[in-house]
Amino acid sequence: MIKKAIKIISIISILFTILIVSSLLLSKYRLGKYNNSVINDEIIQYNEVDRLFEKTTDKTIYVFLYDEENDDCIYLDEVLLKDISNDYNGIIFHDIYKVKYEQSYRSYVHQLIKNTYQIENFPAIVAIEKDGNNSFIKKDSFEYLSDQEKNEKNLHEFLKRNNFFEISHKD
């Protein structure tokens, strides 16, 4: 009788463990598939920004210097921009392109990007134009800071200055 009870308990324990593991795997899969971003989905290499100018007739391109492993980038992308989008009737910022940037403060690429876009802080969203020499001219920028209140205010002002809210209105 005791052996039978131990067998039943061990089978129930194994089934319960399988249920928990499969539930965790399913949850991880679903979370990985969820995209909370409200900007252009395309991720462009930092040295391919020129092709954005070929794809559009707009003079100004908006690049989001983005590192998918950086918590500040993810927060800016999926929380701050999402909150502003919700405030403006779910507006999607199609004209902001993610430019892949893996942060390495010791690298040549890091300094090159800072110089090219004339910024000091990452992540950043930079409005750029091309001049006659195929160089980028910074028109405006939003640079992420450690001060949360300033980030929200500065991001909103940047988007407003660059007319992202013209087609939408705040309720």
Image: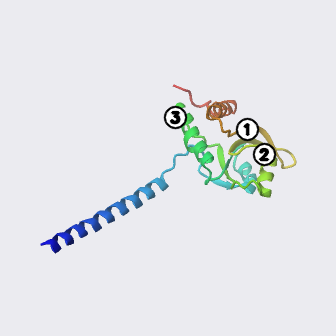
In the image, what residue occupies the spot 67% across and 30% down?
157
Lateral position of residue 141 relative to residue 18, left or right: right
> Identity of the amino acid at label 1?
Ser
Q: How many discs mark residues in the rendered view?
A: 3
Lateral position of residue 25 relative to residue 137, left or right: left
In the image, what residue occupies the spot 44% across and 55% down?
30
The residue that mark 2 highlights is 117
**In front of the other: 87 or 2:** 2
* Numbered disc 2: secondary structure: helix
Q: Position of residue 117 (x, y in %)?
A: 78, 45
The residue that mark 3 highlights is 86
**In front of the other: 18 or 33:** 18
Q: CA distance from mark 2 to mark 1?
A: 9 Å
Work out which residue is located at the far front of the displayed protein and give it.
2
Say if mark 2 contacts mark 1, CB within 8 Å: yes
Q: Position of residue 132 (x, y in %)?
A: 86, 46
Rate crowding at label 1 as few (under 14), some (14 to 19) or many (20 or more) other CA atoms within 10 Å.
Answer: many
The residue that mark 1 highlights is 141
* Numbered disc 1: secondary structure: strand
> Identity of the amino acid at label 2?
Tyr
Q: Earlier in the sequence, mark 2 or mark 1?
A: 2
Work out which residue is located at the far top of the displayed protein and give it.
171
Q: CA distance from mark 1 to mark 3?
A: 22 Å
Q: Position of residue 56 (x, y in %)?
A: 70, 46
Q: Position of residue 29 (x, y in %)?
A: 45, 58
Q: Is residue 1 above or below residue 132?
A: below
